[in-house]
Image (cartoon, coloured by chain):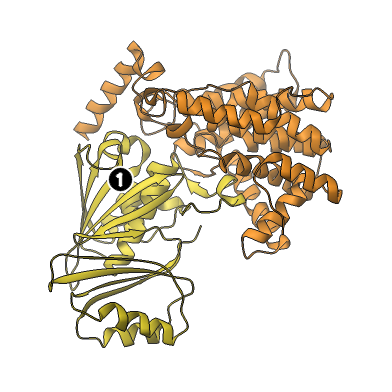
Chain colours: A orange, B yellow
Amino acid sequence: MIKYSNFEDVYKEAESRNKKLYEICELIEEQNTEMSVKEIRSKVKKNLDAMEAAIKEGLHSKEKSMSGMCGDDCSKLLEMYKKGSKLFSKTYQNVLTYALATVEQNLRMGKIVACPTAGSCGIVPAVIFAIAEALNVDDEIRINALITAGLIGELVSNKIALAGAVAGCQSECGVAAAMASAALVEMYDGSNEQILNAAALTLKNILGLVCDPVAGLVEVPCVKRNAFLAIYAVTGAELAMAGIKSVIPIDEVVDSMQQIGEMMSPRLKESSEAGLATTKTGLQISEALAQKWKSE
Amino acid sequence: MEKTKTLFDVIGPVIIGPSSSHTAGAVRIGYLAGKIFGACPKFVKFRLYNSFAKTGKGHGTDKGLLGGVLGFDVDNSDIKNAFEIANSLNVKYEFEYLEDYNRHPNSVDIILEGENTPKMEISGISVGAGEVKITKINGYKFNIDGDYNTLILIYKDKPGMVYRVTALLQSQNLNIASMHCDRNNKGGEASMGLCIDAAVPEQLLSELGKIDEVYLIRNLKVLKK
């Protein structure tokens, strides 16, 4: 029986058994559900397949969302990259386009994996698939990576609900980025300590991010934020792989996220009553959509 | 009780977007309502409240609810085409958009009418991350979230009814995880929602059906998650 309530417990458990964090996560899941480790891994593989399908479909679509606000940004990036990128590598391009492809599938009512939420669904798949391609790793490594990501999200969600309405976007896209950082370090075969440092560094630097979507829809600023935070997650992993440590341990970062979430005004928590949602342009869009939908 | 989070709550579920609360949650409420109604309806009316009403069209809440009533799961790519599919099945539908801040931000009433099935009104809320609750059936309070096999009974309010039902469950060695009762008035009609740890066998349902004072029985299977 593994007793755990925070990252420190799970880390100590892993170190004392000489196991990776994803292995402890598998054992915890086995303990909490009626699935065997083999069944758990095969279900994770299914979710990876769904992520891959969303990326593939998303890369070939320009279909706009029902509001018409978003949906063709990925195609714009791809168009530019066809002409050759000026600065960055193919892997960097893939992180950006995979994130947009996934989250645009979401807004056009395509099939996605909420990871941890629908609005943040592009971040983890973008990092896992773009880097897996670059490192040329097999399914097993990708499964280990997604389980590592899941462990981060699960332990955060034991303390705080992963929902913009509860703690702002820090608990959706912010947590997704921390999950992606951890997954990436696992793919790099980093240590347990490096995995937790990556998650801590990433989460720490996104604290306070509010949820202020225009017209209450999962589009502005959510779509582009997925691309930004996917790259940002890579930064967290790179720092951790170099041995850079988060001065504040991950458990304490989560505690402060919870505190900040509680202090955040409800107007900045998915209610669209402040921030970008109530800018001049945000209100104009919201009003125009209300008219459009009334007339339909 | 708070539910234990599992790995697949965080790296899943696989759903049709764009919103776990406003799309996937809507599908699940519709799905449960359809199962509680127990037949393919001829006419469905949806009254959406508050955030569901304001942002529903942009989130496909309308399509999700209707698709759910038609029996779609949260990952069914046809949710997007729910209107066309309902039309082809001759299911008429209507949406009303309302404000009532005494209600949960993501609330809906679903009124279902069928050919040989009595009209039903079922209310639900989407509480976040795709999790939902059926809060009312025909005016009676319930608390159904699809995490358990759930027995729903409406029956005459008189002494001994809870005993008769639970005795039948005990005879099959079925354990009750939670139960919730309500009634309209003393000696009138009452309702019971029972969350059961295992699947409820057909034979038990027919035994329950033999009790004269039981007017309605539904057996909801645990939701695929």
Q: Quadrant of residue A131?
A: top right
Q: Chain of mark 1?
A: B
> Who is closer to the viewer here, A166 or B27?
A166
- Where's residue A194, x and y in %? 80, 32
Q: Quadrant of residue A91?
A: top right
What amino acid type is highlighted by mark number 1? Asp
Q: Is residue B143 above or below residue A179?
A: below
- Left or right of B136 in this view: A273: right
User: Can the viewer see residue B70 in this picture?
Assistant: no
The number of discs equals 1
User: Can the viewer see residue A221 in this picture?
Assistant: yes
The structure residue drawn at horizontal position 62% and vertical position 59%, both measured from the top left corner, is A32
Q: Is residue A244 above or below residue B96?
A: above
The structure residue drawn at horizontal position 22% and vertical position 35%, both measured from the top left corner, is A296
- Where's residue B82, x and y in %? 34, 51
Q: Is residue B223 above or below residue A127?
A: below
The structure residue drawn at horizontal position 61% and vertical position 61%, both measured from the top left corner, is A33
According to the picture, the residue beneath numbered tag 1 turns out to be B62
Q: What crowding class fits label 1: few (fewer than 14 Cα within 10 Å), some (14-19), or many (20 or more)?
A: many
- Left or right of A3 in this view: A103: left
Q: Residue furthest right?
A: A18
Q: Residue furthest front?
A: B159
- Where's residue A190, x and y in %? 83, 35
- Left or right of A60 in this view: A273: left
Kindly state the secondary structure of the residue where label 1 is placed. Answer: helix
- Left or right of A48 in this view: B89: left
> Who is closer to the viewer here, A292 or B28?
B28
The structure residue drawn at horizontal position 25% and vertical position 81%, both measured from the top left corner, is B160
Q: Quadrant of residue A282?
A: top left
- Where's residue A45, x and y in %? 68, 53
